Image: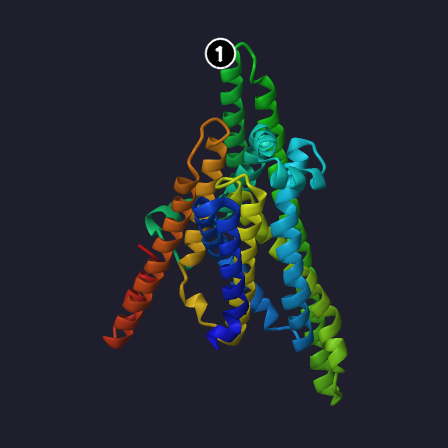
Amino acid sequence: MLLKTFGWSFAVTALGLVAAVFYGGWTGFGIVAILSILEISLSFDNAVVNAGILKKMSAFWQKIFLTIGVLIAVFGMRLVFPVAIVAISAKIGPIEAVRLALNDKDQYQQLVTDAHPSIAAFGGMFLLMIFLDFVFEDRDIKWLGWLERPLAKLGKIDMLSVCIALIVLMVTAMTFAANAHQHGGTHVDKAETVLLSGVAGLITYLVVGGLSGFFENKLEEEEEREHEQEEEAKKSGKKVPAVVMAGKAAFFMFLYLEVLDASFSFDGVIGAFAITNDIVLMALGLGIGAMYVRSLTVYLVRQGTLDDYVYLEHGAHYAIGALAVILLVTIQYEIHEVITGSVGVLLIAWSFFSSVRRNKALARAEGNGSGSDEKSEVASGV
């Protein structure tokens, strides 16, 4: 069962890692491995959401999503999007960006280095918004309760995450402005670039969130309409045709899933720029990760067991927050990719083992016949 579900993912992993060794040696191997782990972890909540919606779809639409939908996710977001970011930031054509990345690494590296402040500001703000919206939301299950409880109370203030993100951006831009005065104004353009790119990242986040919300509302409307039709049919003794029941709603589900997958892909793609600027290594690592998202989605639909690791979503979002900070710091200071990658992986590993410990504690509480208060304390985090 496991091999059947994850077989293609294992095969793509082996091919991707071999290609990484041929392309970038053992350093390339390490970067691709870190990127793959990060992408899988950051996309775990994507797989959980996908599975929840996919269960409601007919076999036909499930197949459409797991074939065409994944092709869009792998090639559209994980392969094309990084190239597009580099091309826009460096002000060159996408074909030229790929040609330079493959044939003239020195010039490509120089272009990406020059464009790094705009990429980092855009990505840092986008990731920061994901993190802030997560920690300011009140959840039944809390991982680091001592931190998440007060943050959830603060989150009741409207638009707090946007305000904090803009303050962070202003401080970052002002830091470059201060450096510009100290160095005779040589970094004025850099400060302006950081400010504009950061605002663009914030707008992109809001637009993607708006699209997700729009399709979610459409989906709810269609489900409600189908439910009403089903109730009317039961009262009148008629049977509603299956095509009507699955057609329009399933189409909106598919669109909703694609928009959601695109929004979930942003964090992995943008976070990858904190680890490497090489779009070939990036494509290999993110491509491997995207295959596991598909396999995890299938596994969840069939088994529904991976959602037992409730803190993984928390760990992934803390990793996103760490990547956001790292990206903003790398505008001015260089941070080694091993440190960048390790921070995210360690946070996710910590959340995984915390989930395992929680499950064992809950099992012990049930075995000892403990009351609901103890179970609720375990579930709410430390």
The answer to whether one can see residue 156 in this image is: no
User: In the rendered image, which residue does mark 1 sit on?
Assistant: 182
Quadrant in which residue 257 is drawn: bottom right
215 and 29: which is toward the camera: 29
Colour scheme of this structure image? rainbow
- Crowding near pointer 1: few (<14 within 10 Å), some, many (20+)? few
Q: Image check: 371 left or right of 18? A: left
Residue drawn at (53%, 38%), measured in percent from left and top? 124
| Depth order, front residue of 12/329 | 12
Q: How many marks?
A: 1
Q: Going by the image, does 177 lie left or right of 351?
A: right
Does 233 sit left or right of 30 as displayed? right
Furthest residue in direction left, as rendered = 368
Task: Give the residue displayed 62% in from the left and 50% down from the top.
Answer: 79
Using the rendered image of the protein, determine whether residue 382 is visible from the camera's viewpoint.
yes
How far across and down, in percent of the image, does residue 270 sit? 55, 43
